[in-house]
Image (cartoon, rainbow, N blue to C red):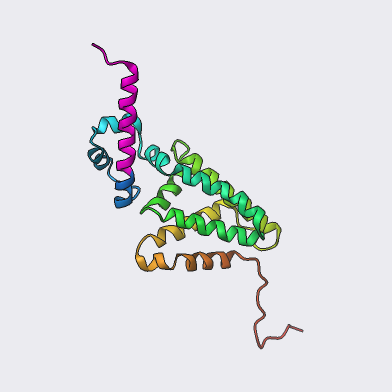
């Protein structure tokens, strides 16, 4: 006797839930390059079952992490409305680097996905890049950031800080300091006068 469709759907949903629960634990332990075989084994399903629900690693990561990335993109609008443009940009980039260091290898995965339109993570990465670009443009219009910087620069630099911060506890502890150094380098300031020099006649 054939299994009723409703029962099959319920079994599929239970498998999916088990896979996601296992994936959260394995990604926490191994980072974004976690073994999908380990995920399937911990979930108690076959690797084929995992691939039926999540055909690629990025599809699994998008389901696990995409909501957080969408929230981060939306936060840019809240920050833009709440304070000065330069402070909004700094606060958003702090949030970005904090989230991007939540899992080992995540910043590299985000950078790869941004350049791969076929990746399930691409849309989330693009939304985050555009959110940062909007805050950057506000800060540039207000005269806080040099005009030769664009949204891809900001995304790439923040991802680089996140990657470095994820390499050791020592660099993780200096994440905010490293980001501040990057942002100071992007600030639009006049070059200081050199002491002891006179203008040529």
Q: Quadrant of the C terminus?
A: bottom right
Q: Is residue 115 visible?
A: no
Query: What is the magenta range?
Result: 1-23
Q: Nearer the viewer, residue 62 or 151?
A: 62
Asked if 101 appears above or below 5 in the picture, the reply is: below
- Describe residue 81's horizontal placement relative to residue 180 as left or right: right
Determine the image quadrant of residue 19: top left
What residue is drawn where x is 53% and y is 65%? 182
Q: Main secondary structure of the magenta part?
A: helix
What residue is drawn where x is 39% and y is 37%? 59
Determine the image quadrant of residue 23: top left
Asked if 35 appears above or below 157 in the picture, the reply is: above
Q: Position of residue 169 (x, y in %)?
A: 35, 66
Q: Residue furthest top?
A: 1
- Describe residue 190's horizontal placement relative to residue 159 as left or right: right
Q: Position of residue 64 (x, y in %)?
A: 40, 42
Q: Nearer the viewer, residue 14 or 54?
A: 14
What residue is drawn where x is 71% and y is 86%? 198
- Describe residue 186's horizontal placement relative to residue 122 as left or right: right
């Amino acid at each position: 006797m054939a299994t009723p469709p409703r029962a099959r759907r319920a079994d599929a949903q239970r498998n999916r839930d088990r896979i996601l629960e296992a994936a959260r634990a394995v990604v926490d332990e191994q980072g974004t390059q976690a073994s999908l075989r380990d995920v399937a084994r911990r979930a108690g399903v076959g690797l084929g079952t995992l691939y039926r629900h999540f055909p690629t690693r990025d599809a699994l990561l998008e389901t696990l992490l995409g909501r957080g990335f969408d929230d981060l993109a939306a936060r840019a609008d809240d920050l833009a409305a709440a304070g000065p443009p330069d402070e909004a940009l700094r606060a958003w980039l702090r949030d970005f680097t904090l989230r991007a260091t939540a899992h080992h290898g995540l910043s590299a995965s985000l950078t790869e996905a941004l350049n791969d339109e076929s990746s399930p993570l691409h849309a989330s990465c693009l939304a985050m890049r555009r959110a940062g670009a909007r805050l950057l443009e506000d800060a540039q219009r207000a005269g806080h950031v040099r005009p030769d910087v664009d949204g891809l620069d900001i995304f790439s630099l923040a991802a680089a800080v996140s990657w470095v911060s994820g390499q050791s506890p020592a660099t993780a502890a200096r994440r905010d300091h490293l980001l501040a150094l990057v942002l100071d380098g992007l600030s639009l300031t006049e070059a200081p006068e050199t002491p002891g020099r006179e203008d040529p006649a």
